[in-house]
Amino acid sequence: MAAQTRRLVWPLLVLAGLLAANAVATPGFFAVSVKGGRLYGSLVDILHFGAPLMLIALGMTVVIALRGIDLSVGAVVAVSGALACEIIVAAGDDGSAGTVAAAVAAALALSVLLGLWNGFLAAVLRIQPIVATLILMVAGRGLAQLITDGQITTVTSEPYRRIAGGGLAAVPFTVLMAAVTVLVMWLALRRTALGLFVEAVGGNAEAARLAGIRATGLAVAAYAFCGLCAGLAGIIISANTGSADGNKAGLWIELDAILAVVIGGTLLTGGRFSIAGTVLGAVIVQTLSTTVYTMGVPPESALVFKAVVVFVVSLLQSPRFRAQVAAPFRRGGPPTPARGPQGPAPEEEDDAMRTQTGAGRPDRREARR
Amino acid sequence: MDTAAGPAVQMSGIVKDFPGVRALDGAGLRLEPGEVHALLGENGAGKSTLIKVLTGVHRPDAGSIAIGGRPVAIAGPQDAERHGIATVYQEVNLCPNLSVAENILLGREPRGPFGISPRRMNRRAAELAAETGLDLDPARALGEYPIAVQQLVAILRAVDLDARVLVLDEPTSSLDRDEVRILFDLVERLRSRGVAILFVTHFLDQVYELCGRMTVLRNGRPVGTFTTDELDQRGLVGLMLGEQAGELDRVEGRAHGGAPPADAPPLLRARALGRKGGIAPYDLDVAPGSIVGLAGLLGSGRTEAVRLLFGADRPDSGSVEVDGRPVPLRTPRAPIAAGLAYCPEDRKAEGLVAGLSVADNLLLAMQAARGWMRPVPRRARAELVERYISALRIRPSAPDTPVGALSGGNQQKVLLGRWLIMRPRLLILDEPTRGIDVGAKAEVQRLVAAEAEEGTAVLFVSSELEEVLRLSHRVVVLRDRRVVAGLDNGGGLDVDGVLDEIAEGGAR
Ligand SMILES: Nc1ncnc2c1ncn2[C@@H]1O[C@H](COP(=O)(O)OP(=O)(O)OP(=O)(O)O)[C@@H](O)[C@H]1O
Ligand SMILES: [Mg+2]
C-alpha cells in the first residue's frame, strides 16, 4: 500500500501545479457557489465535464491491468449516444421518463454487447488487443452513422437532458455517476478477490490459469465492463449537447483515457492497477483541457501544450529518469542503462521478470566493437 | 585481450543493498585463470547477486572489482562481455521468439556481402552445437525447446564469446545426466584453455567432481575459501547452513515411508490418456498415500504426461477418473476441484506471478478455488501465510515481498507452498527440488514423504534419479514420449536398473 501511495505523489504534485497555475491566471478559480440549487465553479466544471473521461478511464484501467487495451471506447461513445437519441426521437421526442429509460437501457445493453465482442476477439480468439479493438474503433463509427442515418440527431427531451444537466443535492448527476462507479469498482475489485485475480492474470496469465483462475472469462468481463463505461459516457456526452454526432462524439477520447490510466500509475504491461491513480489521472487530463481553455492558449498550440505536460508527468514517473536526476546526489555516478542480449534487465526496472521477451535487440554496433 | 597478470577476477568487500535487505555484506572472491571455482551457499545467500554485481547488472554499494589485476567499473552486461566475462544466468534470459542461432550469436552475427548472413549464422550455430554433441536445429525458434536445452544454448552463447571468465549460475539444475556430461566436458575444455570458471550449484557432488576451490557465502557474508581437499561435504554443509546443519541428519538417509496399502483402490486412474506430439496414450494408477516417480531423459514426455492429468494441456484421447468419477480436462479447474495440484517445472513462466507478493502467490490457488466472491478472511490468510513461510523457510519472510525479488530457491518454495496449502489429494510435482539448497531439498523431500504418509498421493518428476529412488514407491519410466515400464521400488531397484530401462526400455 505504501508503495501505491508513493506512486501517486508525482501525479498529485502535477495536479497541484496545474491548479496553482490556473488560480494565478484566473482569479476566483477555486470559488464554488450554489446557484439555483446547483454547484457552480471551475472545479465543479472540471469534474462535471471530466465525468465521461473518468468513466472510460475506469473501464480502461481493468482492461489495461489485464494486459489488454481498448481503442474502441470512443466509437462506443458515439454508438451509445446515437442509439439513445434515435430511440427517443423515434418515440416522438415526447421526453417521457419511460421512453428515456428504455433508450438508455438499450444503449447500455448495446455497449456491453460491443464490449463482449472486443473480449471475444481479444481473449477468446487471442487477437492482439490493439488490433482486435481497432476493428470496432473503425466499425463503431460506421455503426453510429448507420443508426443516425448520417445525420446529427438532436433531442430536446427534458428528462434526457437532465441526465447531464440535473443534480442531486446540488451535486451534478454526472459527478455522482462517476463517484458511484469508482465506489462500485473499488468494492468489487478490492473488497473481493477480483482485484487479485486481475493482477494475477495481468502479471502472468498462464500461471494464473494453472492456479485455477478463469483467465479468459475475466478478460471478456473486463472488456464488457469497459464497453458499459463507454456507453454510459456516450449517454452523458449526448445528453450534455442534446445531440448525437456519429463522427465527432467521443473522438480521441480513447487516447485521453489511456493517458489518464498511465498517469495514474497503472502499467501498460499489466499486472498492477490503481483506481485512485486513474481518478487522479482523469482529473489531470481534464484540468489540462480546461487550463488550455481558460488560460487562452491559442487553439493551434493547445495540443502542444497538453503534450508537454504529459511528457513531464511521464518523465517524472520513469525510474530511469529519476535515477539519472538523483545520481549526482549519490555515490557511484549515473546508472548505466546498457542491457545485454541475455542479461537480466538493469536493476532499476522492477518489472524485469515480467518483460522477459521485451528486452529487445542490443545495439549491434556497440556489441561488435 | 591482453594476457592477465593477476587473478582473472578479484572481488572484495562487495556490499549490495536492496530495499529492506542487505543482500551482500563484504562478500568477495578470487578466480584464477584455468580453475573451476564453486560459489556456494544456501538459498538467498547472495550468490546470484554477487554474480550480477560482477556482470554489471547490479551496481555495488561498496567494494572493488579487478579483472586481470586491473581495477574496473563494469557498466552493464555488455560491458562485462567486453571485459571477457560470459555469463549464464540462473533464470534463462534469452529470446524465445528468436531462432537458436540468433540467440547464440546475437550481437556478433557473422556477415556476408549483404549484411548479416542467416546462412552463415545457422552454419556457425550448427558447428557449435555439433562440437558439443548437441542435437539442435539452429533455425528453429528457441522457445520450441524445453528449458534444459535453452540453458545449454545459453552456455553455447557464452562459449562462443571466447571469454576468459565464464560464470555459470546453477546451469545444471534442469539438465539430466547426459547433458550434465556435455556441460562438464565443455567446462573442462574451457578450463584447460585457461578460462576461469565460476560455478554455482546446489549439487555438492558436482562441486567435488569439477571444482578445485570453493567460496562459501552465508547471509551475504563470506565464510571463507577452501580447496575441495581440505573441506569434505559434511563440513561444507555445516558452513553453508550454520547452526541448522544438525537437522539435515534427520532427513538425510531417509528412504520413503512404508509401503502403501497394496489393496487400496486407486485414487487416480488414467486410461489411454495421450496427446499427439506430446505423449503417446498411457495408463496410470496412483493409490492414495503412494509416491510414483517419473523417470526418463529430457524430452521423454514426463512433463507432457503430467500436464495432461491436470488439464494444463488438453488431451486428445483417453480419460481420467478420480475416485472412480470422470474428471473433465478442458481446464485445470475441474482437476483442482477433484483434489489435484500441480507445480510446473518452469516456475517463472508458468508458476509465479512475479509482481505479486509472497502472500498473494501462496494463496492464489486457494483463492481461485474459493471463487472471487469469497476472499480468504484476513485472519486465516495471515495465519496460513505465516505457517507456510516458516514451514518452508521462505526468506525473506516478510509476506508482502514481491516474489520476483526472492532468490530462485525461495521462489520454488513459494510455488510448492501454494499447493501444499490446498491440502491436495494428488500432488503432481515437476522438478520440485530444482534450484533449492541442500537443507531445503531435504526439507521438501521430507514434506513430500510426510504428505504421502498422511494419505496424499504424489506424482513426482525429477531428473535426479537418486531422488526419485529415495522417495518413490513405484517408478514409471518414459522414453521417446511413451511410458515404457513401471518398476516397483520395494528394494533391489537401483540407479543402474532404472538407467537400463531408460536406455533400452523402448527397444524391447
Ligand atoms: N531485485 C531484488 N530486489 C530485492 N531483493 C533482492 C533482489 N534480488 C535479490 N534480492 C534479495 O537478495 C538476497 C540474495 O539473493 P540471491 O538471488 O543472490 O540469492 P542466491 O544465493 O542466488 O540464492 P538461490 O540459491 O536461491 O539462487 C535474497 O534475500 C533476495 O531476496
Ligand atoms: Mg541464485
Image (cartoon, coloured by chain):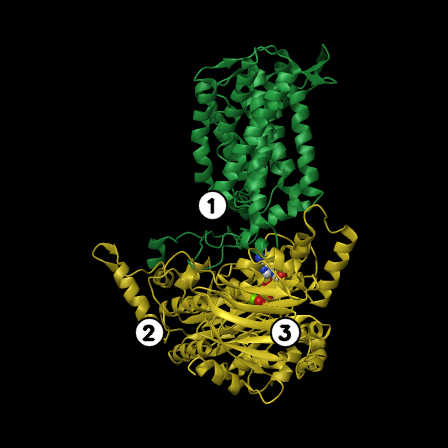
User: Mark 1 belongs to which amino acid?
Assistant: Leu
The residue sitting at 46% across, 81% down in the picture is: B505
Query: Could you say which is closer to the camera, residue B318 or residue B242?
Result: B318
Disc on the earlier residue, 3 or 2: 2
Q: Position of residue B343 (x, y in %)?
A: 60, 64
| Numbered disc 3: secondary structure | helix
Which color is chain B depicted in?
Answer: yellow
Q: Residue tagged by mark 3? A: B441
Query: In the picture provided, is A233 more to the left or to the right than B35?
Result: right
Report which quarter residue B144 is drawn in: bottom left
In the image, farthest residue toward the bottom: B492
Chain of the residue that carries numbered disc 3 in the rendered image: B
Chain of the residue that carries numbered disc 2 in the rendered image: B
Residue density around tag 1, few if under 14, some if 14–19, many if 20 or more, within 10 Å: few
| Numbered disc 2: secondary structure | helix
Chain of the residue that carries numbered disc 1 in the rendered image: A
Task: Tell if the residue under mark 1 belongs to the same chain as the one under mark 2.
Answer: no
Question: The chain coloured green carries which letter?
Answer: A
User: Mark 3 belongs to which amino acid?
Assistant: Lys
The numbered disc on residue A125 is: 1
